[in-house]
Amino acid sequence: MSEKHITRPDAEALLFEYTQSDALRKHARGVEEAMRAYARWFGIVDAQEIIVWGVVGLLHDFDYEQNPTEETHVHVGARILHERGYPEPIIDAISSHADYMKILRDTPMKRALYATDELVGFIGACVKVRPSKKIADLPVESVVKKLKDKAFARSVDRSCVYGGAEAIGRPLAEHIAFVIDALKPIAAEIGL
């Protein structure tokens, strides 16, 4: 399979095959949309290449539900992706999101995945505690403030959120605003 033959329906079918959790599926969809937005931000205009960036976001955790440990998550997923014929650059980009894989984030795609993964989850947590429970009403300042509250959304690795903004080369507030804006069009679909 070449990057030209990667399709979103095939990637979604793979995600659904390995991930039953609605929350994980919604997270994957959110990261997909943030990745598409960052592809355009990096100047990519080719529609197929934008799809590929989205597929990287959609599949980054597809094996997590069945393989939730550092010894298995990403390792098993990479093997499955190889078996399904996904190209090495896609597998490498997906694998790079896990710090323990120690893969250099040397492409804009890898940096964007690292920058969006934890932040998408954190934004979702922030929305759920808003009075309106809507991303449309989520101010960037609220997200920044919640990041400082270590008791809030404890499972989110703050170093990935801060490091992600740095990897992308954007101030934290600007990066957060960008991801919030990327998620707004699919808010109903992902429960935000």
Image (cartoon, grey):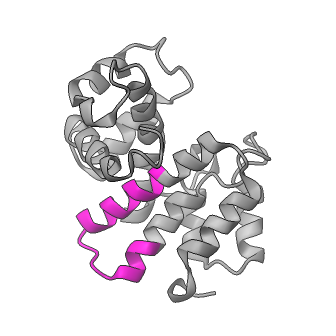
Displayed quadrant of residue 50: bottom left
Please indicate whether residue 7 sits to the left or right of residue 125 in the image: right
Please indicate whether residue 3 sits to the left or right of residue 147 in the image: right
In x, y percent, where is residue 133? 38, 26
Q: Is residue 183 magenta?
A: no
Q: Is residue 84 above or below residue 100?
A: below
Name the residue rendered at 75%, 61% in the picture: 17
Q: Is residue 49 above or below residue 14?
A: below
Which quadrant: the C terminus? Answer: top left
In x, y percent, where is residue 74? 69, 54
Please indicate whether residue 166 sits to the left or right of residue 24 in the image: left
Name the residue rendered at 29%, 18% in the picture: 145
How many circles with numbers are drawn on the protein? 0
Name the residue rendered at 74%, 40% in the picture: 68
Name the residue rendered at 64%, 87% in the picture: 1
Secondary structure mainly formed by the magenta segment? helix
User: From where the camera sits, is residue 111 visible?
Assistant: no
In x, y percent, where is residue 55? 52, 67
User: From where the camera sits, is residue 152 visible?
Assistant: yes
Q: Is residue 20 above or below residue 8?
A: above
Identify which residue, 40 or 113, lies in the foreground.
40
Please indicate whether residue 187 sits to the left or right of residue 142 in the image: right
Q: Which residues are magenta?
A: 30-51
